[in-house]
Amino acid sequence: MKYLIKNGRVIDPANSVDDTLDILTSDGKIAKIAAKLEAKADKIIDAKDKIIAPGLVDMHVHLREPGREDKETVKTGTAAAIEGGFTTIVCMPNTEPPLDNPKIIRTLKEIIKKDALAEVLITGAITENRFGEKLTNFKAMKKEGIIAVSDDGSSVDKEKLMLEALKAAKKAHLVLIDHCEDRQISGRGVINQGFMSTKMGLRGMPRESEYERVKRDIELAAKTSSRVHIAHVSCKETVEIIRKAKKKGVSVTAETAPHYFTLTESCCVTYDTNTKMNPPLRTEEDIAAIKEGLRDGTIDVIATDHAPHTDSEKDVEFDFAPFGIIGLETALSLAIMELVDKKIISLNELIMKMSVNPSRILGIDRGTLKEGSVANVVVFDPGEKYVYKREAIESKSKNSPFIDWELKGRVQAVFVNGHEIHRH
Amino acid sequence: MKNDTEKRVAWTKKDLLGLEYLSKEEIEIILYTAASFKEVTTRQIKKVPALRGKTVVNLFYEPSTRTRTSFELAAKRLSADVINIATEASSVTKGETLIDTGKNIEALKIDIIVVRHNCSGAPNILARAVHSSVVNAGDGWHEHPTQALLDMFTLKSRLGRIEGLNVSIIGDIAHSRVARSNIWGLTKMGAKVTVCAPPLLIPEGIEKMSVRATNDLDEALKDADAINVLRMQFERDEAMAFPSKIEYFKKYGITKERLDKARKSKEIVVMHPGPINRGIEMSSEVADGPHSVILEQVTNGIAVRMAVLYLVAQGRRA
């Protein structure tokens, strides 16, 4: 199939392109990109007043398969990804069983081959069973195609083990992603420690539990001259620590999630368990710091930490509900509303953070519309408003605090390997 | 109480989840209504037909005798039928969820669920899921609104007013729902509230609830018109913030000697939500002494809970 996407504003920051151009795809590749392109195509798509960008890349997704297909599957999770404009997603290893050995990764690869609508890359566990006791075999998992390692959901507490993990990741050319949380500090906390935890009578998670761990990881990365990627930055101290480390030349990259620049702890006030996540929602000051971090480049990536949970798991007491919300289908809109519309970053920079930078960190040839590259393309209207309805959610789980919000910025068409998957 | 009748506005709320969610006027309605029910409780025949044909379910996820008994008596004196359900909250998937339990109870065609739960916010979640009225009988560390209402009712009967009073709440503020409800209620009614506890038992940001915080008991007693002394729960792991019971009593225990140093030592009112740990948070001399209104609080609890049940039943109809 050949597609001709015409008259759109092509934003391709990896190649310094921002212009009204036409794109021709052929055999799954970007065949040609030029103004007023005259070419034969099987289908012509008019993208007038729309943005054409490299497909979005989400480096932090929980697909739940294998083991928790009641929450999400590769099929439903990638459908949600497409709905949100993501053509490549990276899934986390906290499945049941966890992705901690080559065999289970082979199994998952089979499922992906069969069911995935978008590209799915795999993160392997750092430690066996994610128990934080014994390293997994990075090399063997790499052979099966993993792209990163992480114990996401927990952090490796033992410093010596983390040191070994960083060295091993470097040797195997894998990105090490850390969910930074010192459980000794966060304990049984369920929301940010501060005024809201006091008012609501809930156990607080002090911000130290995040940033003390970030500090440690950065020190260890510096010591071993290896690199570390900090997942879901939620507090101002973390932003500052990463900023300083980058200035010193430490090889550290970082991501934040849309909820951390959109919502604060005050959203928890009704005990709605869809405001319960880990790290927890913080304060206005933290949002300001995260936005500044996104603006000045301290935070490289916007990732969703898409964490599906069923209604029956979430419709319980706040203390008992699992942490996390889905995010694939709302990320682009929230980023446009909170960051672009509020003039924190430009649309170009947004594409950097949601496509180019994650591709670079992962070392994959995505996030580009260069002729000859894989035709992963998103077409979206940054101005289109719509109400995010529960019934319209593609993800198998509906645990979003943004249901019934009026959102702005909507995906029109998505191409994965040159195939059109989605059209509104 | 001369202006109370004029101030009366209609009660519209189906639930009582906490004093944070009430206006000053709504608190006044409850106190006013409680005053008329108080009279009922002193009659020979202590029963009125206000809630005849209504059913109240006491759904208790935490053991409690006094609060449950008080609610049960309150409902019975309003001629409501009462059912007590004692159960245990659990995070494991086996067993019925709070919402399912609530909906099943509601399917029995009941009118009011009085809920006590060890998780903060459980009554809020329940109230969203059912059409019946929900009354919070204490949730986690969050709120215990009827306790604070009966504390305020007692204060008002003793001192004639709440506005302008200096009230000190002493004890484990961090883990106390009684403290939070009292703070909301008292500050809305115009009292000046001081909280007093060892440093680790004063939660972060409490000053934003318009209270003064101190670690010094004498400071908390100095200008107090009334004190509300909380039960120290040493069996709870969070309370390990304080080394020992004896140590606690030495520093924060209310004794006659400590009270004598207060400026208003003669008329200072001493409250306690019970049950008292004698010799830990308060000496027996104080608990049984002239300042103590502890048993009066228990008696007033029934009138206040009658008022709450009566009002939420009205609110539901509206």
Image (cartoon, coloured by chain):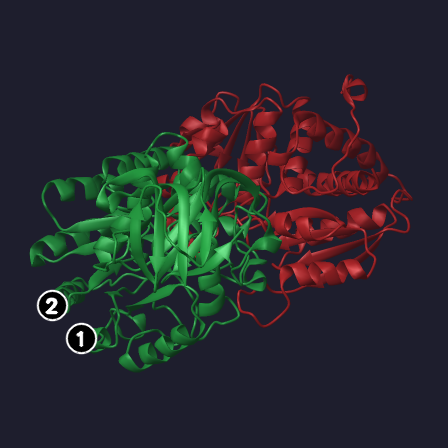
Residues at discs 2 and 1 in contact (Cβ within 8 Å): yes
User: Which chain is depicted green?
Assistant: A
Which is nearer the eye, A212 or A354? Answer: A354
Where is mark 2, residue-wise? A171
Query: Can see residue B79?
Result: yes
Q: Quadrant of residue A282?
A: top left
**Callout 1 secondary element:** helix
Q: Quadrant of residue A165?
A: bottom left
Numbered disc 2: what chain?
A
**Residue A205 to residue A376: above or below:** above
Which is nearer the eye, A272 or B185? Answer: A272
Q: Residue at x 37, y 76 (%)?
A: A108
Q: Is residue B212 left or right of residue A127?
A: right
Color of chain B here?
red
Where is mark 1, residue-wise? A139
Q: Amino acid at mark 1?
A: Lys
**Residue B132 to residue A314: above or below:** above
Neighbours of disc 2 within 10 Å: few (<14), some (14-19), many (20+): few
**Callout 2 secondary element:** helix
Q: Is residue A411 left or right of residue B291?
A: left
Q: Are marks 2 and 1 on the same chain?
A: yes
